[in-house]
Amino acid sequence: VLGMQTLIRITIRSDLAWFLWEIPNVLIMAAYWLRARTCAGAACAPNRNAFTIAGCALAAMFCSHYVHRAIIYPLRMRAGAKRMPLVMMLVCAVWCICNSYFLAR
């Protein structure tokens, strides 16, 4: 319990934390989309339908949403906003990485 209290006390600026936990969404989705676009053959079988109109529209909406959440929103946060525990930022980052990985597949 004592170690956890010490870990919770480590904080990070809210705008930086927001950026760090949201940016993997954009990067992972873009990486999978580019990979699906450039590869060919049996190795890309799961991604062969990535370029349907619906698939492209969903990927574009996902990326534009997370570009706003990861870049624009943190830049608009007011200066001196409440700091965030590092543990919370790390848990959110893990969630966003898993979420974008599964959605990109």
Image (cartoon, helix red, strand yellow):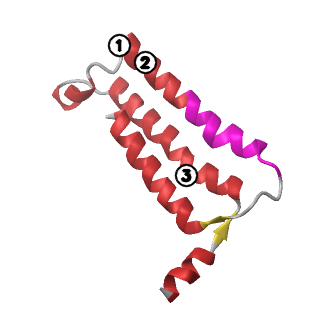
Q: Quadrant of the C terminus?
A: top left
Q: Is residue 41 magenta?
A: no
Position of residue 27 in the picture relative to residue 64 (left or right): left
The secondary structure type at the circle numbered 3 is helix
Identify which residue is drawn at 70% across, 40% down. 73
Could you say where residue 29 lies in the image, as x and y percent from the top left?
44, 35
Identify which residue is drawn at 71% across, 61% down. 13
Q: Which residue is mark 2?
A: 56
Image position of 102 with respect to 17: above or below: above
Q: Which residue is mark 1?
A: 52
Q: Which residue is mark 3?
A: 21
The picture quadrant where one finds residue 64 is top right
Residues at discs 2 and 1 in contact (Cβ within 8 Å): yes
- Chief secondary structure of the magenta portion: helix
Q: Nearer the viewer, mark 1 or mark 3?
A: 3
The secondary structure type at the circle numbered 2 is helix
Could you say where residue 58 lies in the image, as x and y percent from the top left?
44, 22
| Residue extending furthest toward the right | 79
Q: Nearer the viewer, mark 2 or mark 3?
A: 3
